[in-house]
Image: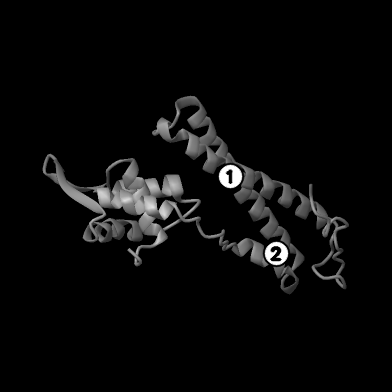
């Protein structure tokens, strides 16, 4: 099983919940783990076949009228492999954030570009917070599609809410700190925020 990837186990995790077609898996990957482990739909479509080749998933052809679909389900060997994977702590957060990269090197651009970038981060942050809160309200009102899984779902969802709140605090601070700048370097009129190097409580 050494050739299995985290994506393999993400798919196995979903198959452990219920059986899916590859189309349904792609949708559910986007809905449930897209913020944690985003993968292209093309990757999701291929992975169940690899899992089946290793005996970790089964497939069944079903028909609605003349239209056929392949439904994948987890095998007992798949459940055992998933349980073994769960016993090892996961890798640390690895972040790719182009907007923040542009903030970190804004002195190679213009003040207008920096402010546009900060505004884009605010818009993105507000959208992510709204999406997380909408999901929270959905689960609070209905229990979601898998109410028996709600305790662990709530742990992950709370992370994204806290992350969005932290981003909101940071963007408000960054916009305030740069509001009176006339450029992006000290010589141009940028100033170091007075609390830039203080550890927030």
- Please indicate whether residue 199 sits to the left or right of residue 57 in the image: right
Q: Which residue is mark 1?
A: 159
- Please indicate whether residue 8 sits to the left or right of residue 142 in the image: left
The answer to whether residue 148 is seen in the rendering is yes
The image quadrant where one finds the N terminus is: bottom left
Q: Which residue is mark 2?
A: 103
Question: Which residue is more in the foreground, 74 or 169?
Answer: 74
For the point 87% across and 63% down, the residue is 191
Which one is earlier in the sequence, the residue at label 2 or at label 1? Answer: 2
Considering every residue shown, the one lying at the far left of the view is 66
Q: Residues within 10 Å of mark 2 (few under 14, many from 20)?
A: some
Helix, strand or loop at label 1? It is: helix
Question: Which residue is more in the foreground, 22 or 1?
Answer: 1
Residue 2's tag is none
Helix, strand or loop at label 2? It is: helix
For the point 46% across and 51% down, the residue is 34
For the point 78% across and 51% down, the residue is 173
Q: Is residue 141 above or below residue 97?
A: above
Question: Which residue is more in the foreground, 155 or 168?
Answer: 155
Q: Is residue 82 above or below residue 145?
A: below
């Amino acid at each position: 099983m050494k050739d299995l990837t985290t994506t393999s186990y993400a798919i196995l995790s979903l198959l452990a919940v219920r059986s899916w077609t590859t189309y349904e898996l792609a949708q559910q990957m986007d809905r449930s783990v897209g913020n944690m482990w985003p993968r292209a739909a093309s990757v999701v479509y291929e992975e169940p076949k690899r899992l089946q080749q290793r005996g970790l998933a089964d497939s069944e052809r079903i028909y609605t009228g003349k239209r056929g679909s392949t439904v994948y389900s987890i095998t007992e060997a798949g459940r055992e492999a998933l349980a073994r994977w769960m016993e090892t702590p996961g890798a640390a957060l690895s972040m790719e954030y182009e907007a923040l990269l542009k903030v970190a090197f804004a002195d190679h651009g213009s003040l207008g570009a920096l402010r546009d970038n900060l505004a884009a981060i605010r818009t993105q942050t507000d959208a992510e917070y709204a999406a997380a809160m909408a999901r929270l309200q959905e689960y609070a009102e209905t229990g979601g599609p898998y109410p028996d899984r709600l305790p662990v779902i709530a742990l992950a969802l709370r992370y994204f809410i806290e992350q969005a709140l932290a981003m909101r605090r940071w963007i408000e601070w960054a916009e305030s700190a740069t509001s009176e700048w006339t450029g992006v370097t000290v010589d141009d009129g940028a100033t170091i925020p007075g609390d830039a190097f203080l550890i927030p409580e």
